[in-house]
Image (cartoon, rainbow, N blue to C red):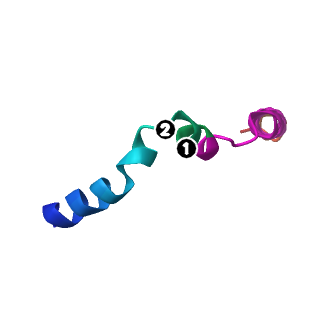
Amino acid sequence: MISKWKTEFLENMGAAFEKDAVEEKDSVDTQELYAQIGQLKMENEFLKKSFKKLGG
């Protein structure tokens, strides 16, 4: 198993140290994620308030 990992690393070691390769993987749209987090927080607060009004 380790020899397989070593072979794979040696074949791709150039990509392991390239800055561009890392940036491409991290190119998730952060604005979209923040918007989704904000919406989920609002929905969560709404549900908490609704639950309290129902006597929970």
Name the residue tied to disc 2. 18
Q: Secondary structure at mark 2?
A: loop
Label 2 neighbour load within 10 Å: few <14, some 14-19, many 20+: few
The residues colored magenta run 24-50
Up the image or down, 17 lies above or below 8; here it is: above
Where's residue 19, x and y in %? 53, 34
Horizontal side of residue 28 vs 14, given as left or right:
right
Please tell me which residue lies in front, 31 or 9.
Answer: 9
Q: Which mark is residue 21?
A: 1
Horizontal side of residue 50 vs 18, given as left or right:
right
User: Circles 1 and 2: CB distance less than 8 Å?
Assistant: yes
Where's residue 48, x and y in %? 76, 35
Which quadrant, please, contains the N terminus? bottom left
Please tell me which residue lies in front, 14 or 35.
Answer: 14
Q: Main secondary structure of the magenta part?
A: helix
Please tell me which residue lies in front, 29 or 2.
Answer: 2
Label 2 sits on what residue type? Answer: Glu
Q: Residue at x 15, y 61 (%)?
A: 2
